[in-house]
Image (cartoon, helix red, strand yellow):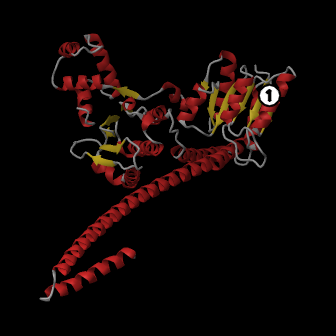
Amino acid sequence: MFKKILIVEDIDSISIGVTTLLESNFDADIRSTKYCDEALLKLKKAYNENDPFDLVITDLSFQDSQRETKISTGEDLIYQIKREQPFIRIIAYSVDDKPFRIKSLFDSYRIDGFVAKGRESVTELIDAVTLIYNTGEKYISPQLAYILKDFSHHIDEDDIELLICLSNGMTQSEISDTFRNQLKKTSSTSSIEKRLNRLKLNFKANNTIHLISIAKDIGLI
Amino acid sequence: MIRKTYIFAAFTLLFFSTGYSQTPNAGIQTRHRHEVLLEMSKDYNKVLLLGLVASISASFVLFYKLSQKHKKEKMLEAYTAETRISQKVHDEIANEIYSTILFVASEEIVSGTKKDKLISQLDDIYLRTRNISRENHDIDTGSRFPIQLKLMLGCYSSDGVNVLIKGLEKVEWDKIIASKKIATYRVLQELMVNMAKHSHATVVLVDFKEEKKKVNITYSDNGTGAAGEKIIFKNGLQNVENRMDSIGGSIIFDLSAGRGFHLTLIYPANTIYV
């Protein structure tokens, strides 16, 4: 298991809660700090003393404190840590669940896990630490998993063309011929079939007639 | 002032000369002088008229520019206020409630079923504050705007409803200024929130186009439709209208369709004036 864990969290009660939780579940040396600057210093010191931390659990936003700070957000801290000691695993632990921010944490800041503070976050945090240690996979709170999967559906001009052809009563092989004549890339009957099946899923339609009816309802054709 | 006296003088001379010209003793010289003065006064009239037209149109342009500037400032102000409050709600309230949940869960202040109830009520409040903070967060208006918009729309997809996006890449977002991006994002967000709450739709389509230097976004769903939605949507709709108005855009409702809710947002893609 991880030997040395650093918790960066500016609200005492949360910090204490997380420390107790980790201590009772893992056999590790757990330290905590309220400030990003101090966190970075602690990491540096441990590294120089040849006893580096191997996991950091950090909040993302920190309230303005009276003292002068160089690093004021979790993102900046994560960036610095990954730059100086890239082997350290990082879990972001935050109230913030904006999809865009979380996605960029994984894509640009290369964090290893994201746990949203919430009712289930205690068990999620244990799961995250275990998963990251054992498999090295990325962890994200289950209710936010959609962010990494990209649930948006896209349709294009060819999809609409296909719907119009269907609504005009053409058979799939006729549509295939039309598409071929228009030099479209996907014109074989099997690719038309595939496209049609994808459209049925996208439109939550049970069959082709249902599909056309929905497409009409939303004014696509 | 100088011009006024000049013209007054010209008129006085004209009056006198007209008087003279009526007398039988009038010579060729006076008639000549009279004509010259008439010409002069005509010229001054022209100058005066031209000046008047110029100053009126100048003040119109100035008024328009100032009112646009004012609009822009107001919108920016509203946006900063929004994000500031969102940040405060997030930092101060959501975090506090969360630590209260932790406290209640770990301490023996209440026990049994009451504890569960208390925690779930706190959790409910916590989730609501988090939603307020999320709905009003700041928006990246740089090159990552389209990805952000896509993610926002995508997160309203669920087991019950699919959000379809068409042509997002057809709009040249790089060339559209920040205030328009913010308005676009917020308006679509408003529509999605309304959709999720009231429409009972299973499919939503957001269709982006850029034609003739205008951004054209069509929203349509297959829900209960305008009759049901419009009334509930009144407040949100006012917001949508205000936002579109502030970027020189407009909304068109399509009431002809039998089912669902359909509207089109149009605004100029170029940056002139706004």
**Relative to B2, does residue B126 appear above or below in the rendering?**
above
x, y percent for residue B238: 38, 55
What's the chain of the residue with tag 1? A
Along the viewing direction, whichever of B5 and B185 lies nearer the viewer: B5
The residue that disc 1 covers is A43
x, y percent for residue B65: 41, 56
**Which residue occupies the extreme right position in the image?**
A49
Using a 10 Å C-alpha cutoff, classify the residue at mark 1 as few (fewer than 14 neighbours), some (14 to 19) or many (20 or more): many
| Residue A141 visible in the shown view | no
- Left or right, B69 with respect to A10, comes to left
So how many labels did they put on this image? 1
Residue plotted at (57% across, 37% down): A97
x, y percent for residue B123: 60, 44
Quarter of the image for residue A95 reads top right
**Which residue occupies the extreme left position in the image?**
B24
- Left or right, B107 with respect to A211, comes to right
Residue plotted at (57% across, 34% down): A101
**Relative to B242, does residue A13 appear above or below in the rendering?**
above
Which quarter of the rendered picture does the C terminus of chain A lie within?
top left
Q: Secondary structure at mark 1?
A: helix
Residue plotted at (43% across, 46% down): B183
| Residue B192 visible in the shown view | yes
Quarter of the image for residue B224 reads top left
x, y percent for residue A211: 26, 27
Residue type marked 1: Leu
Along the viewing direction, whichever of A73 and A13 lies nearer the viewer: A73
Which quarter of the rendered picture does the N terminus of chain A lie within?
top right
**Relative to A178, does residue A90 appear above or below in the rendering?**
below
